[in-house]
Amino acid sequence: MPQDLYQTLGVDRTATPDAIKKAYRRLAKDLHPDRNPGDDASQERFKKVGAAYDVLSDAERRKLYDEFGDESLRVGFDEQQARAARAWQGRGGPRFGGGFGGFGDGGFVDLSELFGAGGGFGGGRGGPVRGPDVSAELELPFLDAARGGIHTLSLGSGPVRVRIPAGTEDGDRVRIPGHGGPGRGAPGDLIVTVRVRPDARFRAEGRDLVVPLVVTVPEAILGAKVPVETLDGAVVVTVPPGSSSGRRMRLAGRGMPGRKGLPAGDLYVEIRIVLPEIPVGDDRAARAAELLAGLYRGDPRET
């Protein structure tokens, strides 16, 4: 049995959008594959958390989920048909065993008999019936998904151009009307699920991004202006004097683009200090190390 989406995020059904967002960010950070290499259970839960947030962060999808439960998550779900089925059941029709959020505990009814062979409620077997929806997957590099754009999906019926919104995350779905299966009337829709390949530079923490910035020892000690890569190209950041490895600098609004009513995330530049390559027999490094050692006050491991 699928887990309740609210339970997946660890929030109440009355949780505010802000509480849902905070819960997702916390879980996504803790379960991120970069923090749990080789842990299949964490990676699977990471995917489930993302899928739950995708539904509960969308006001309309959350409303449907609250009303119809897991049935609303099925590809091609039609709320009007679902409500019509509920009304029909209330007028004395047979009860559903597993659909529409627990409409009853009686016998099972084949929805194709109720709605017509193609899903058109009330159309009868001779009237116009909308064609079925068709599912497909589109795999994209992280930067392509984050920046958005038009991509081509190859199907058996030929290529289809898909417009991907900026800020798309793994598991997001895009509906393309009229590119599904044929019917006795209008064709169905094509439902494209986007699969995002991780990026070697950018690490996602919810809608925020983290990018490493390599600096030299002198730059870390004295400070420097260093270029760093963002989704919109390189920008110059100021490394404060005395920066240690792991220090983060925040670039507001430079993370994942805003969508679904959420603002853009932030970009965190994470300092990584690199040591110079020292030739064998060169004692300058030893002299420099001795000089630096004298500048520490107390044991840095106790701070």
Image (tube, grey):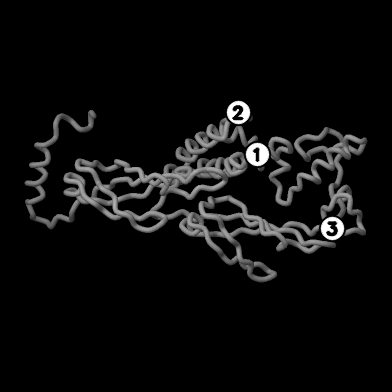
- Say which element carries label 1: helix
Amino acid type at circle 2 is: Asp
Number of numbered discs on residues: 3
Q: Quadrant of residue 229?
A: bottom left
Q: In the rendered view, does 237 fall on the left or right side of 76? A: left
Give the x, y percent position of residue 177.
70, 59
Name the residue tied to disc 1.
62
Q: Earlier in the sequence, mark 3 or mark 1?
A: 1
Q: What residue is drawn where x is 73% and y is 42%? A: 71
Q: In the rendered view, does 282 fall on the left or right side of 251? A: left
- Quarter of the image with the N terminus is top right
Name the residue tied to disc 2.
12
Give the x, y percent position of residue 133.
73, 57
How packed mark 2 is, by other alpha carbons closer than 10 Å (few <14, some 14-19, many 20 or more), is: few
Name the residue tied to disc 3.
129
Kindly report the distance in space between the C-alpha atoms of the residues bearing marks 3 and 2. 40 Å
How packed mark 1 is, by other alpha carbons closer than 10 Å (few <14, some 14-19, many 20 or more), is: some
Q: Earlier in the sequence, mark 3 or mark 2?
A: 2
Please, is residue 286 above or below residue 2 in the view? below
- Say which element carries label 2: loop
Q: Earlier in the sequence, mark 1 or mark 2?
A: 2
Amino acid type at circle 3 is: Val
Q: Residue furthest bottom?
A: 158
- Say which element carries label 3: loop
Which of the pair 135/86 is nearer the observer?
86
